[in-house]
Structures are given as C-alpha cells and as structure tokens.
Amino acid sequence: MNRDNLIAQIKKKKSFLCVGLDTDESKLPNHLKGEKNGVLEFNKAIIDATRDLCVAYKPNLAFYEVMGSKGWDILQETVNYIGDEHLVIADAKRGDIGNSSNYYAKTFFEKMNFGAVTVSPYMGYDSVKPFLNYKDKWAIVLGLTSNIGAEDIQTKELNSLLSIGSEGIQNRQRWMQLYEHVAYELKDWGTNENTMLVVGATSPDRIEKIRNILPSHFLLIPGVGAQGGDLDMVMKKGLNSDIGLLINSSRGIIYASPDKDFATKAREKAIEIRVLMEKAMKDNKLV
Amino acid sequence: MNRDNLIAQIKKKKSFLCVGLDTDESKLPNHLKGEKNGVLEFNKAIIDATRDLCVAYKPNLAFYEVMGSKGWDILQETVNYIGDEHLVIADAKRGDIGNSSNYYAKTFFEKMNFGAVTVSPYMGYDSVKPFLNYKDKWAIVLGLTSNIGAEDIQTKELNSLLSIGSEGIQNRQRWMQLYEHVAYELKDWGTNENTMLVVGATSPDRIEKIRNILPSHFLLIPGVGAQGGDLDMVMKKGLNSDIGLLINSSRGIIYASPDKDFATKAREKAIEIRVLMEKAMKDNKLV
C-alpha cells in the first residue's frame, strides 16, 4: 500500500489504528484453546471485528515462529485473509548484511505479500536498503522503542557527524541521542514513501524531537494500551498535515475478553480508540 | 553446549571453526537444484564432510525463511542432523520487547534445540535477557559487524556513562564508540558462560579494543572468507587463554565448488582453515 492510499484509508475510516496480531496460543479463549486451527480462527474473528476500524494489522513474528512451520502457514493465511485494504506489517525486527537482508525482503514482500516489515537499524544502511527496493512497500525502522532497555543503547548521546553519505549533514547538530541520529539517517536512507520510524509512546518531548527531524514521515507508535502510553499526548505531538501516525494496540484489543465474546469486546476497544482518533483529526482539521 | 564443553571440543579438534550453513536454494550444485530435498541433502553432505573439522554450525535464518514453512522444517531437520557435539547457532539477529523475546528464546532453545541465537543489542538488556535464562545456551550479541553499514551506527562515538544498572561503570571511560559500549553492556547483561559478542574481522585495532573490554568472552567472528578479513590477524588479536574465538566461514566453504564434488571441496577448504587454527593454537601453547 503506498502513502496516498494509506492516507486515503485513514481519512475514509477516520482512524489510524493498527491492530497488533500478537496472537499467543496459550492466551486463546477457552473454546479455541487446543483447537487445530485455533490461532487462525481467532485472527479471522479479530480481523472481521475490526476491519472497518483500523488501517493496518501487525502480526509479531515471535508468536508465529514459536509454533514452528505450522506458525508460518497460519501467518500466511492471516495475511491472505486481511487482503489489500490494510497495510499488513510483519513485525519481524529483521536486519542483516545485504545478502541476507535481500532474502528477508524477498520473504516478506514477494513470497508472503506483506506491505511493510519492521527492521533494526543497528547494522546500518546496507542492511535496510534491500527493503527499500520494492514499490509501495515500507521498511519501518526501529527508532525509540517503548521498553526499559531503550535506555541502554537508544538514548545514548553521540557524535552524529562521523557519518558517511549523509546529504543533510550540514543541517545536523553534532550531539544528539542515538534514536535521533537514527531518525536523521532514515532521511538519507529512504523517503517518506518507503520508510517509517518506530517511536514508543513514552515521552512527549521525544516524540516532538522526532517529529521535528521527520516532519513528513509516518511514525509507527507501539505501546498504547498494554505497554502504557498516552494516546492524546501522542496525537498532540505526532500528528502532521498528512496525519503521519499509525498507532498500534495489540493486547488491549485482542485480549479485551478471554471468553467467547472476545471479538465483540475487541471491536468495542477498537471503537474507543477510533473515536478519540476521529476527534483529534477533526480538532486538527485533518478530516 | 556449555563453555567447558566448547573449549574441550576446540582442543580435541584443534579447531574453532564455525561453518555457516547459508544455504541458498539458487546456488545448489546442478544435480541438487530443483530436487525436492535439495537443500537438506546439501546441508547433510556439508555436515558429513566437515563434522570433525569444526565445533559449530551457523545456519542464517534468512535463507530458510525464504522457503516458507518448508524452510523451517528443513532448518529443524538440519539441527537434528548436526546432533549434540557441535554448538548450533541460529543466526537470526532477533531482538524485541521482553514478551516477544521470550517467545523467540522459546522457539530457538526449547522447540528447535539450538544452542545459541544471534541477537541485536538495539533494544537493550530486557530484549536480550530472555535468551540468558537457559542453562548451557548462549545469546550471541551483535557488536561490530563486518558490513559497510556498521559505520552508520556502530562506530559512532558516544557518552557511555548515561547508563542504568552498570556494575562496572566506575571503571568505564566516558567516550567510546557504540560497539565498545555494547561490549561493556554485555559484561553487565550476562557472563562469559552465556554471552558472546559478534565482531567482524575488519580491523586489528577494533578486535584488540573488544578483547580488552571482554578478556574472557568468546567472540564470534564472521567475515573470514567471502566477506574478506584476515584469519591470522584475528587470531593474533583475538585468542585468549581459553581460545575465546569462534571463526565463521560460510560461502568460502559451502560453495567451494558448484559441482558434484562440493562436499569434498568444502572439506578441503575447512582443512585449510583448521590447519592455520591448529598452528596458531600451538604457537600460543593453547594445545
């Protein structure tokens, strides 16, 4: 899905919600637990219940790989079931030397038909580049994550100017935190049509800093819901004239109820978020 | 495989070679190309030809995932075929928030019976911790990789002292490159019995710096062979009193010949490397 289509979907649905399909076999409702196709049935029910309320789905690969080759089949069937009207993001956090990254890109974009993949920036441009060679596909690069370990590496203050091939280097300040440096690198690596940045909803200052570095890029915000975070704050600091946000909720939606009504409750939670999104878009005259 | 067993295997075989099973379906010898079990047959032949010459095997997941669920089955059969006398490393470069990393660790260690997984440090300690909770298993963390993109992120000079929970902080210098900071973090995150660091064979200075930070850790060195690198230099700068090195070669060994003699030629290449390793160990009175 390209940028224009994504924005059109957001305006049509008045929602920039991404539903995280982190489907944990052990957390299925009782009536699906132990069923042969339990995870797939669960995903289909969640998708049916939220399709008109969200613009993206994001399965986290960890929950599928743990099921072995069966998990990969379920993942593929889930992607197929979602169809073409949503951005389907493989939350895979891949990243390797060019030759291997080529194969990861081929796997997710060509073989499985995902629209986007999350990618780690640690190995630099040539590890991300293979994901940028596909028309209307996205590399969503980790910037500032929402876990406590972000402080171990991502928030270190560094000298950003020891960089190779940075076109915007003359406008760049010398000292910044690593996640800011990654945001600057992203501008060199790709465009606002093939890259997004992952930014945890942990602090208004940090979202504002990244929005200043990347005024027109989409940001993927995890951590609203079960991981904490503040939807209003994120929208206040993160919205731009093209919306520019995808806000993910996983557990808060898909595990809203542990019973047979899980899909109905998931829909209710998704509506709660969508209503707030519509209000924010209207307040900012974006719809 | 625990540290003592690994060292014993190295001394017995007079080799610290790791064979990278980056088996690319499109690069199979002609007689195996298009065969139903071509990749698995290839892997088995390589393993049979090199088993006594190496102490570790490292399949890169990119090459298996691209085959879909079939690839995961081939990967599992390859791990099973290798058996218990080698350290089997999933070169997966995973890393996610704790909950997801738990599942990755479970996948590779419990379900698939790998002995080690490569992990990205970008998301910090809590993303690596789940891999450290398994007895006799290893998290092999990316430090300095051998690709050009390492210079985009890993070699940035940063302020290392803005760290939380670093026991060794009083002995730590303030300014260092990110890969050095990651090496220091590794000392806090785990021990020399459950963590190793990936260090590309790109410069003697850098290997020396890391060896000074991590005197007793094993280092996994990729990039000897097809990616360039200098075996003698790495051994000179990297060997410690417990050997402390695993040196990987992938394409240089497994694609030594494109014909029916691929396994024989792979063995010849592995012998060439093992001979140099034996000499270095003898010169350093390590065997």
Image: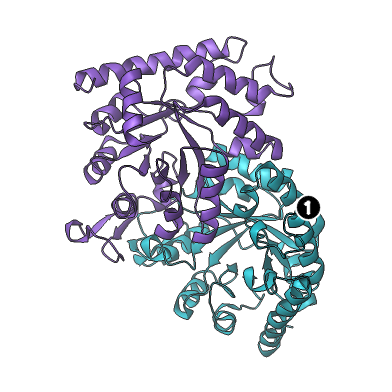
Chain colours: A purple, B cyan
Q: Quadrant of residue A174?
A: bottom left
Q: Position of residue A157 (x, y in %)?
A: 30, 56
Q: Position of residue B264 (x, y in %)?
A: 78, 75
Q: Is residue B217 visible?
A: no
Q: Is residue A176 left or right of residue A6?
A: left
The number of numbered badges drawn on the structure is 1
Q: Position of residue A90 (x, y in %)?
A: 51, 38
Q: Where is A239 relative to B255, above or below? A: above
Q: Nearer the viewer, residue A218 or B181?
A: A218
Q: Could you tell me which residue is drawn at 36 percent across and 34 percent down?
A: A201
Q: Could you tell me which residue is drawn at 69 percent across and 69 percent down?
A: B254
Q: Nearer the viewer, residue B167 or B261?
A: B261
Q: Nearer the viewer, residue B259 or A193?
A: B259
In the displayed image of the protein, which residue is found farthest to the bottom?
B283
Q: Quadrant of residue A46?
A: top right
Q: Could you tell me which residue is drawn at 23 percent across and 32 percent down?
A: A240
Q: Where is A27 relative to A99, above or below? A: above
The crowd level at tag 1 (other Cα within 10 Å; few <14, some 14-19, many 20+) is: few
Q: Position of residue A104 (x, y in %)?
A: 54, 50
Q: Could you tell me which residue is drawn at 51 percent across and 49 percent down?
A: A105
- For the N terminus of chain A, the quadrant is top left
Chain designation of label 1: B
Q: Where is B159 relative to A285, above or below? A: below
Q: Which residue is mark 1?
A: B37
- For the C terminus of chain A, the quadrant is top left
